[in-house]
Image (tube, rainbow, N blue to C red):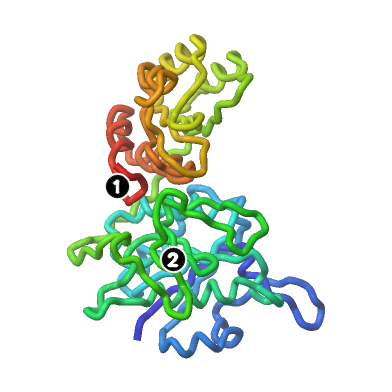
Amino acid sequence: MKRILLIYTGGTIGMFQNPQTGALENFDFNNVLLHIPELRQFNLHLASTTFEPPIDSSDMDPSQWSKLVRIISDNYDSFDGFVILHGTDTMAYTASALSFMLEGLSKPVILTGSQLPIGTLRTDGKENLITAIEIAAATHEDGTPRVPEVCILFHNKLMRGNRTTKSSADQFDAFKSFNYPLLARAAVEIEYNDEFILPYNPQAVLKPHFSMDSHMVIFSLFPGMQASLVEKMLNTPDLKGIILRSFGAGNAPQKKWLSDALSRATEAGKVIVNITQCTGGSVVMQRYETGIQLLSTGVISGHDSTVEASIAKLMFLFGLGLTPEEVRSKMNECIAGEITL
């Protein structure tokens, strides 16, 4: 009998409508089998733990990521898979962070949530929860886990966590993986795309990391940027990393003040990572003169990374205590399936 641990952090999926009062109350996941008896058909042992108090996902931060890593690492040998119930707004950030913080992971960690509370009519939460649990318990014929990585399951789609972005505030199909194929699709059967799933490593040993350095900023280029404001941002005390969201394939305005400001920032030890503002595609700074200009300032490519994965990766690498040069080198490595090289 497979053992799955449900971790409820907060969010819409954990709300239940009181039939007497009509008020929304927190769902007790210790009694999940009473409310969703279909789960008994899996013949699984389900246990649960809840953040006290549950938090809205807009309040998620690195300290809460560390809390999740602690829960998973403390229970790692006792369970075959983990399902994290999470609000949708920052789910992709959490999934990205966990993909780096859970080094050596060889068991499924599936994040899911919902757009409607699990205790309301037409909820998407019930189906998302059932499917996430089924995937967390799924194995190959030899008994090894089918999906030994951090994923997001939403609206019948299984996506690599650090390749996923929330794309809609009000549709059930709320998440997209623009630059990487789906890992699985749940229809009448769950159809796995095994060639895109990280391979199971029987020798892997979980090495949890708990420290993330959040001295970072995300900055989007736009027409009409003011030099004084950009320079103040780049000169912020204690700033270590910048995610620069550029145009197209990694292009920026050919303004001397911008090049000079970026050059001074990199010379001061700040790591600047260039990712595209487009939903899909990759940064290729060598393609146009406007991108080559960025290369000359010391800006490095974020390749086809999502904004969520790129900021989480920077926070993780600086959290390891690496030097700026070491961080620059590691940002150009794929360490958890987050970029295509």
Residue 22 sits above or below residue 271 on the image: below
Residue at the extreme top? 256
In which image quadrant can residue 114 be found? bottom right
Residue 244 position in % (x across, y down): 48, 30
Q: Quadrant of the C terminus?
A: top left
Q: Is residue 122 above or below residue 242?
A: below
Q: Earlier in the sequence, mark 1 or mark 2?
A: 2
Q: What residue does disc 1 label? A: 335
Q: Which residue is mark 2?
A: 110
Classify mark 2: helix, strand or loop.
Answer: strand
Q: Quadrant of residue 229?
A: top right
User: Callout 2: few (<14), some (14-19), or many (20+) C-alpha neighbours within 10 Å?
Assistant: many
For this orientation, the residue located farthest to the right is: 21
Residue 4 point in image, percent of width and height = 41, 76
Amino acid type of the residue tagged 1 in the rendering: Ile
Name the amino acid type tagged 2.
Ile
Q: Residue at x 39, y 36 (%)?
A: 302
Calculate the distance from the C-alpha at mark 1 to the C-alpha at mark 2. Answer: 19 Å
